[in-house]
Amino acid sequence: MNVIRFIIENHDQVIELALEHLWLVGISTLLAALIGIPLGIAIAHRPRLNKPVLASANIIQTIPSLALFGFLLPVPWLGERADRLAILALTLYALLPIIRNTYTGIRGVDPAVIEAGRGMGLTEFQLLYHVELPLAVSVILSGVRVAVVISVGLATIAAAIGAGGLGEFIFRGLAMVDDRVILAGAVPAAILALAADLGVGWLERRLRAQ
Amino acid sequence: MQRAAASPVIEFRNVSYLVDNTRVLSELQLQVHRGETLVLLGRSGSGKTTTLKLVNRLLAPAAGEILVNNLPNTQLDITQLRRSIGYVIQDVGLFPHFTVESNIGLIPNVAGWPKQRIAARVAELLQLVGLRPDLASRYPHQLSGGQRQRVGVARALAADPEILLMDEPFGALDPLTRDELQREFFLLQQRLHKTVVFVTHDLREALRLGSRIALMEAGRLVTVLAPQQFLQSADPLASAYVKAFGDGLESAANRGAS
């Protein structure tokens, strides 16, 4: 129960780091969604692009996170601020589940429905907006959900390059060999992951087509 | 009718269609006249669905052209072309996330009709296809197969198209429901006089609904015959069909009597 006491005593800092953490995850997931959803839609409609895009996203996923942070460090504008770098790295990691689920969701729409819509004179955009996206939204959002949960975990490593977030406690605790400090970072991070999961899940239910 | 026959609503001029260099459709020459129900009859792979999809440009021909109201359909705006043609398919393809009302009203809606006009049109169409008004707020999964196909027909008619393309619309229904819908469609067509192209592999259905029957086999048009002529045709394929379907075809050809 020392952990709880430690968290209460340092609650200002815990909250600050948690907000920083949330910001890193929020911005990067938003960016990943803004890139990944259109990309997923594109490869669902152009099957030839499907393999190269998914393969690239897959390869990014396999780069160890610490290494990726390291790779990006010398890049001019990025390297100046650790949070920029962390956001870029987190965005890259979040892409795969979002692209893949968008692709799967759109490809999963009943072909008869698409054909009927196209045949009756919906434009490709109207088909996307009125039919494909509403029918794929829950699959797409479950990809976002996976991305968020992964990001909350990965963002703890961003502290290694000085980007802040709850990882600071974890690294500090490791250095101090103090379990309380490690847990003061890890427990709020886990709670954050759960809350984000529930939050996107709620959004998913709200937006789900009948 | 004779006057209208002079200028076909749909005309295929030497149309061929290829899939991976195999001819799915060979030099099709066919005219569809105003107000008639032209049935494309043939077995699977005979090219009848391909023929249908060439009309609303879901497919593009490798050679030849398709004229709609005397204009090559490639010269018309594709969206406008499709909206002037109702399209009904076997799997219905109702939008599962839309109510019956939204399904029927989608094209009027994207075409910018005022809400009241859409609602009035939906009510009118529901009545036309024999559905209770209270079904308007249901979702497709809450309907029976027959009801779904009725909604499909109503949706195709929403913007009052001149032409209807129907691809085995009653093929997936149980025999009783199919019989009911065929009868109702026949009566509906007598009132609406749409120009209909109707695909089926069921001779009985073809005899019952068709003004003329275009028999297709392996991507070629074999012959075009009126239902009564079809029964007496000396054409080997036509008589093979008649034989395969056996007794009771006469009554089907005496349309409306059943």
Image: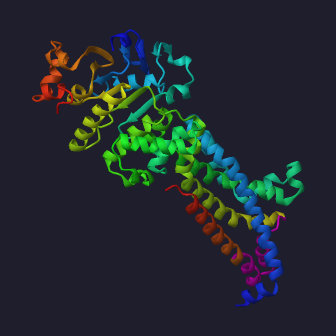
Relative to the observer, which residue lies in front, A25 or B85?
Answer: B85
Residue positioned 11% across, 30% down in the render: B248
Residue B164 falls in image quadrant:
top left
Q: Would you say A89 lies left or right of B143 here?
A: right
Relative to the observer, which residue lies in front, B84 or B123?
Answer: B123
Q: Would you say B24 lies left or right of A187 here?
A: left
Question: Can you say whether A175 is above or below A112 in the image?
Answer: below
Residue B216 falls in image quadrant:
top left
Question: Can you say whether B16 is above or below A80 in the image?
Answer: above
Residue positioned 17% across, 30% down in the render: B257
For the N terminus of chain A, give its image quadrant: bottom right
Examine the residues drawn in magenta and state their main secondary structure: helix
Q: Is residue A73 magenta?
A: no
Residue positioned 17% across, 29% down in the render: B252
Q: Would you say B194 lies left or right of A205 here?
A: left
The x, y position of residue B131, in whole percent, is 35, 47
Magenta part of the chain: A162-186
